[in-house]
Image (spheres, helix red, strand yellow):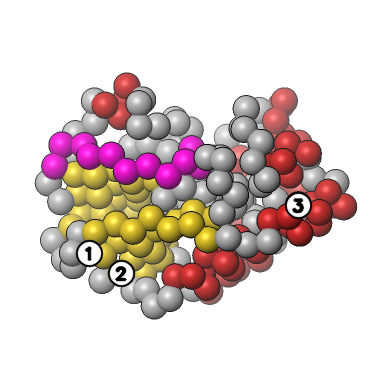
């Protein structure tokens, strides 16, 4: 079984379409959350993934958009929280609010868990050198998929594996190509992929729309701060 895993699309439809075109034939599509926030095509991204039957967990941007947690005052405009709420229909917001914090699947002897940021919450950043990650031990044949950092990662944890597929819509690892990956449950192999799209044209569109320059710059590779 071939399972594509994406995360952190953040309303970037051109990047999502490039990733979907690159996937080819897959058996399932999993999302580690943060479909919305930052960029303008949030309604289209939600509809596209729903139409494909993607299974998604909620991210911190879903929690902010639906009012489950407050947006940091100093970053509310940067995150485009109010704009996101206005761009989504009540039905779409209801769908986002109903997303679970975790998903678990069992395929070909593998246990596959999907969360947004960490096993504990939707806001912890886990990098390869994070002390919290160093203390995490998974049982054999368990795959834990996380997003949130926008950095691809694969780390062994006991007998299992922790994977971050990276961000589709806003990579932060000095590579503007959209990131995602494919898990082959039969072989137990993970293929990390990067897909280019015309991010320069998208940046120009965002500038015309008045999107925060920090968000625009991240697509061309300014370091996230």
- Give 180 or 124, whichever is nearer the viewer: 180
- The residues colored magenta run 147-159
Element assignment for label 1: loop
Which is in the foreground here, disc 3 or disc 2?
3
Q: CA distance from mark 2 to mark 1?
A: 6 Å
Element assignment for label 2: strand
User: What residue is rendered at 70% in x and 30% in y?
Assistant: 75
Which of the marked residues, 1 or 3, is nearer the chain's N terminus? 1
Which of the marked residues, 3 or 2, is nearer the chain's N terminus? 2
Q: Which residue is mark 1?
A: 185
**Residue at the extreme bottom:** 25
Q: Which residue is mark 3?
A: 203
* Label drawn at residue 2: 2
- Give 43 or 171, whichever is nearer the viewer: 171
**Residue 213 location in percent, x, y?**
78, 39
| Quadrant position of the N terminus in the picture | bottom left
């Amino acid at each position: 079984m071939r399972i594509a895993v994406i995360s952190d699309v953040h309303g970037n439809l051109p990047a999502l379409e490039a990733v979907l075109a690159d996937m080819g034939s897959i058996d399932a599509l999993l999302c580690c959350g943060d479909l919305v926030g930052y960029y303008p095509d949030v309604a289209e991204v939600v509809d596209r993934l729903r139409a494909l039957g993607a299974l998604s967990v909620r991210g911190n941007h879903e929690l902010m958009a639906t009012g489950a947690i407050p947006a940091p005052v100093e970053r509310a405009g940067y995150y485009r929280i109010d704009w996101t709420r206005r761009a989504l229909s009540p039905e779409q917001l209801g769908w986002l609010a109903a997303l679970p914090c975790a998903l678990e699947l069992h395929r070909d002897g593998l246990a596959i868990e999907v969360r947004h940021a960490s096993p504990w919450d939707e806001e912890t950043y886990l990098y390869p050198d994070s002390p919290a990650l160093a203390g995490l031990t998974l049982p054999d044949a368990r795959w834990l998929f996380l997003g949130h950092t926008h950095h691809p990662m694969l780390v062994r944890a006991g007998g299992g594996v922790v994977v971050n597929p990276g961000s589709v819509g806003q990579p932060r690892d000095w590579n503007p190509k959209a990131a995602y990956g494919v898990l082959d449950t039969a072989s137990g192999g993970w293929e990390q992929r990067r897909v280019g799209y015309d991010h320069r044209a998208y940046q120009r569109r965002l500038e015309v729309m008045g999107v925060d320059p920090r968000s625009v710059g991240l697509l061309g590779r300014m370091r996230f701060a």
